[in-house]
Amino acid sequence: MRVPGLFSPTHRWRALGVGAVLLIAGRVVVAICGLVQVPIALAHLGTERFGVWVALTGLLWTVSGFDGGIGFALQNRLARQIAQGKQQDAAALARRGLRRLYVVGLAVAVGGGALAVWGEWANWFGISDPGLAAEMPSAVGVAFAAAAISVPLSLATRVAAARQQTWLTGFWSAIAGVAGLIAVSAAAFFHGGLFSFMAAACVLPVAPHAATWFHLRRTGVWLGARAEPDPSDAGLWSESAAFFVPQLGAAFNSSLVPTLMAFFAGPAAAATYGVLQRVFGLVLQLQSLSLQPTWPAYTHAAARGDALAARRIFNASMIGAVACGVATLLVLAPFMSDILRLWLGVMVPDFPLTLLWSVAGWHVVQGLGQPPALLLNGTGHASLVAITGIAGIVGSLGLSLWLGPSWGAVGVVAALAIPYVVLNLPLVTWQAIRVLGHMGELTGAAPS
């Protein structure tokens, strides 16, 4: 059975547009709240504690978004089933995936609890302040607890994306951003310690998933009543494995970077990077959110054998990435010192121009890699992303051990960028072009 009008060309482009606009609007609200948080937290915590907070927040985001690739694999399968009108099969598969995500969440809770209790975080971050060292176990513990809760709840966001209802993520992210700002302000007002600020940081990764979950349950089928037949999940683990390394690589190259900075260059370097990344990362995140609806759109196009639609979506996303994302980053970089002074006043941390331009360049190349990676993920050709991701992560860790101690924050950024520029970006782009060409050969579509 086909759902009337759900995947017509008119609906497809409307869903892409509405999803992109609301995701961007939600992220803008989150970003504004995040920008307001920084001077509040920096003034209350000081540079070292702020750097630790940034590092642990990055760890929180990394682990909360890390489900072993199961979520992405489910999103693709759900999108294919929905595109084919198999609504009950999609509902049953969502429930089966939820059971697996519960297992991942439990593993995060157990492993994170052990790391919080027995991990030598003060030594790993080079912390000399005894008071700050004493606060680390509880701060790490609340971060892992929030991540464990977020993992199974994230299924709701995958279901919404598969149905091309990404507007839900944008809407609830905006609400969570405001709530997070209120929580940080309350932590500062009541003179809370690192634990209080980490608890406030947990609002943003957990609340949008939870709100989307309750919305989907309220609307009926997806996570509620049982439906038959329960589809086979043959191949789901192997498909999840194909997304496992790209997911790890994306986290390694974005949210985990402040944590790497704290490990290899100290909390002060993490604080400096955190300030720069709030501005540069905003551009990259807005681009990513605007392109995110193309993922299920590629899946739907592949299920229909519509090579022309896939090619048009890819061309538009590449043009948008260069004209908007890359151009904005390059325009912002020369004025970054002035922007930071207007934003933070006397609290602006010192940083060399080499760090400024290395961070800007790192975000530029990541922006160029988003459109081809989304195409490969959406069409089920993520194996090359996984292979290059493994090599890139290994190479970056090795280079971080070498360049971090000698070059500090610049060395960590260089260690991340070199494998990506040399290996990941060219190979993933080449594979995306091949997939588009092969799709056209299979369907007889004329190149455009």
Image (tube, rainbow, N blue to C red):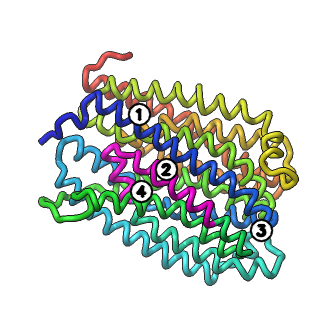
Where residue 246 is drawn, which disc sits there? 2
Q: Secondary structure at mark 4?
A: loop
> In 3D space, how far apart are the residues under numbered discs 1 and 4 (Cα atoms)?
26 Å
> In 3D space, how far apart are the residues under numbered discs 2 and 3 (Cα atoms)?
34 Å
**Magenta span includes 246:** no
Which amino acid, mark 4?
Gly
The residue under the point 78% across, 39% down is 336
Residue 272 placed where, x, y %? 78, 54
**Magenta span includes 166:** yes
Residue at image mark 4: 69
Query: Looking at the image, is 314 positioned above or below residue 2?
Result: above
Using the rendered view, name the quadrant where residue 20 is placed.
Answer: top left
Residue 228 placed where, x, y %? 12, 60
Which of labels 1 and 4 is toward the front? 1
Residue stretch in magenta: 155-183
Of residues 256 and 22, the one drawn nearer to the viewer in this rendering = 22
Q: Residues within 10 Å of mark 4 (few under 14, many from 20)?
A: many
The residue under the point 32% across, 47% down is 162
Using the rendered view, name the quadrant where residue 196 is placed.
Answer: bottom right
